[in-house]
Amino acid sequence: MFQIRWHARAGQGAITGAKGLADVISKTGKEVQAFASYGSAKRGAAMMAYNRVDDEPILNHERFMQPDYVLVIDPGLVFIENIFANEKEDTTYIITSYLNKEELFEKKPELKTRKVFLVDCLKISMETLKRPIPNTPMLGALMKVSGMLEIEAFKEAFKKVLGKKLTQEVIDANMLAIQRAYEEVQ
């Protein structure tokens, strides 16, 4: 089983990102879950979303997981949330940050011993979508780091997910955001 935990603030699109990822992955014949954990969260409150992916039916419906990937789409949460909770030895972290690795490791030394990738999803979303909704750039970074799907196949499938409720202009901006994050993650 492949597990992903998203750390975000309410309103940044983590739930939509997790559900969109689940829609795309489910079309490949895999079993998938997408769910969130938040209380009476208002926009800006810390929250988490989750994905599970497997070839077999997923019987576990608990929030507890040992993630293969931790996606942090709000840069401040690295410093105030326990992003390391229940990590595995090989958990990979993809973090939104305007800092480079040296700067981030200086501020959060615990990251030095972990597999960390950085991309500025907020900057990308502001430049492409004109809004601070960093979920789709994070999906582009995840495709690059994980190799889960080829980027063009992912974008084609994700266009169909977005096409259910967005204009073509917004869909195109999201495709650009996904591609940029795919290219810029390091």
Image (cartoon, helix red, strand yellow):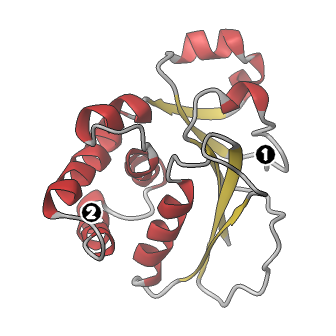
Closer to the camera in the image, 29 or 97: 97
x, y percentage for residue 89? Answer: 78, 45
Q: In this view, does 133 lie to the left or right of 12?
A: left
Using the image, tell me which numbered label, if any, was put on residue 155.
2
Q: Is residue 41 left or right of residue 154?
A: right
Quadrant of the drawing holding the C terminus: top left
Q: Residue at x 44, y 43 (%)?
A: 134
x, y percentage for residue 84? Answer: 79, 40
Query: Which quadrant would residue 78 be assigned to in this image?
Result: top right
Query: Which quadrant would residue 121 be assigned to in this image?
Result: top left
Type of residue at label 2? Lys
x, y percentage for residue 120? Answer: 42, 29
Using the image, tell me which numbered label, if any, was put on residue 163.
none
59 shown above or below 137 = below
Which element type, helix, strand or loop, lies under badge 2? helix
Query: Which quadrant would residue 125 be assigned to in this image?
Result: top left
Q: Is residue 77 left or right of residue 74?
A: right
x, y percentage for residue 77? Answer: 68, 32
Please state which of the two labelled residues, at mark 2 or mark 1, is closer to the viewer.
Answer: 2
Closer to the camera in the image, 81 or 59: 81
Quadrant of the drawing holding the N terminus: bottom right
Looking at the image, tell me whether mark 2 or mark 1 is earlier in sequence order.
Answer: 1
